[in-house]
Amino acid sequence: MRIDKYIWAVRYLKTRNMATQACKKGSVRVNGDIVKPSRDVYPGDTINLRKNQINYELEVLDLPESRVGAKLVDLYRKDTTPKEAFETNEMLQYAKTYYRKKGVGRPTKKDRRDLDDFTESTDDENEAL
């Protein structure tokens, strides 16, 4: 089975086209090698997939005939992604929402002044060195 079809069939990417694009970008590796979308996978292969800043690690257990339901995905792959990858992504999400909520708009005049004060203070520190 082709790698793009396999990634789509085990529900890691929403469409075949997205799976093909991920392969073309170099986000998919099979046994450590960057692969083209037409590369065949076999049971026992290890797949590394970068999606949403997380490096997923999968082991191919079996090949499905076509796209499978979410409950049946575990019959065809074993997810060996380390927990640290998900924790790192969660920390990134907290860091993004710390200062400004999404959709709040442009920085205010006070925000600009704070940024100017910050950059002036770091410039002064650099000159002192």
Image: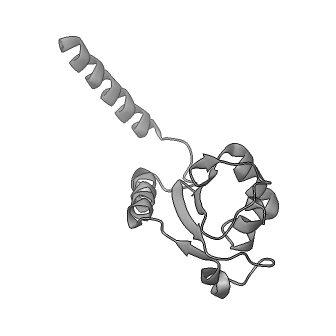
Q: Position of residue 18 (x, y in %)?
A: 76, 57
12 or 36, which lies in front? 36
Report whether 53 appears left or right of 41.
left
The residue shown at (54%, 55%) is 102
Colour scheme in use: one colour
20 or 103, which lies in front? 20
1 vs 49: above or below: below
The outermost residue toward the left is 128
Give residue 65's quadrant in the image.
bottom right
Report whether 129 appears left or right of 73.
left
Give residue 73's quadrant in the image.
bottom right
Give residue 113's quadrant in the image.
top left
Report whether 22 appears left or right of 110.
right
16 vs 107: above or below: below
The residue shown at (56%, 50%) is 32
Q: Position of residue 52 (x, y in %)?
A: 57, 56
The residue shown at (74%, 72%) is 9
Q: Is residue 14 visible?
A: no
Q: Position of residue 115 (x, y in %)?
A: 38, 32
**Which quadrant is home to the C terminus?**
top left
79 or 18, which lies in front? 79
**Which quadrant is home to the N terminus?**
bottom right
Q: Position of residue 28 (x, y in %)?
A: 64, 53
The outermost residue toward the bottom is 71
How many discs mark residues in the rendered view? 0
Report whether 34 appears left or right of 115.
right
Q: Is residue 8 visible?
A: yes
